[in-house]
Image (tube, rainbow, N blue to C red):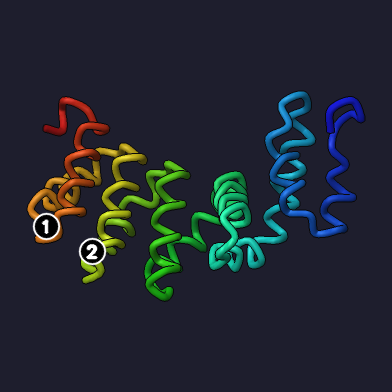
């Protein structure tokens, strides 16, 4: 990218280079290039969602970044996974929804708090804290009394992030 000019989004897309498209979507010198790369990433949404299952941490991180960059279409898929996916997929979905910071995810995250898995509940509470929307505050407050210590600890941290009005 450096001295060679802007990333060639069409070439990256044609070769299925998701990592390159993620870098291109962050290209600050030309907003049109970044927007084109985000659009191209949307075409790989299924592949990117599958990458969430990767044991390769670099692929996992790139998949998470790509989903955040894609935005709304990815958010809607992640909400579906949060509601219907296998446990580990639900955990990833909750984590990425928190990274996205989109208040639309608050209600589905709150509903998912009924899951018996304590790790999923802790991730949901963290996500609600990251999103910072007051509509998730009741769920975070209830999580303070969760029987699992990790969930209660996550709730305390989330309440600090939500600010003094939440205490």
Q: Is residue 108 left or right of residue 18?
A: left
Secondary element type, mark 1: loop
Q: Position of residue 52 (x, y in %)?
A: 55, 63
Q: Is residue 16 left or right of residue 39?
A: right
Q: Where 166 sits versus 109, above or below?
A: above
Q: CA distance from mark 2 to mark 1?
A: 9 Å
- Residue at screen point 87% across, 49% down: 10
Q: Where 34 sits versus 120, above or below?
A: above
Label 2 neighbourhood size at 10 Å, few (<14), some (14-19), many (20+)? some
Q: Position of residue 162 (x, y in %)?
A: 24, 33
- Residue at screen point 68% across, 35% down: 26
Q: Which residue is mark 2?
A: 118
Quarter that holds the N terminus? top right
> Pointers 2 and 1 in contact (CB under 8 A)?
yes
Nearest the viewer among 28 and 51 is 51
Q: Which residue is mark 1?
A: 146
């Amino acid at each position: 990218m450096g001295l060679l000019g802007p990333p060639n989004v069409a070439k990256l897309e044609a070769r299925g280079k998701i990592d390159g498209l993620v870098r291109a979507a962050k290209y600050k010198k030309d907003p049109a290039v970044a927007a084109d790369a985000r659009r191209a990433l949307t075409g790989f949404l299924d592949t990117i969602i599958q990458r969430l299952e990767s044991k390769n941490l670099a692929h996992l991180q790139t998949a998470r970044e790509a989903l955040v960059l894609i935005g709304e279409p990815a958010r809607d898929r992640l909400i579906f996974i949060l509601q219907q996916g296998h446990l580990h997929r639900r955990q990833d979905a909750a984590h990425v929804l928190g990274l996205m910071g989109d208040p639309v995810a608050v209600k589905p995250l709150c509903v998912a708090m009924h899951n018996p898995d304590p790790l999923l509940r802790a991730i949901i509470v963290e996500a609600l804290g990251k999103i910072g929307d007051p509509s998730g505050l009741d769920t975070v407050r209830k999580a303070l009394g969760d029987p699992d210590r990790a969930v209660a600890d996550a709730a305390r941290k989330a309440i600090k992030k939500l600010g003094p009005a939440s205490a």
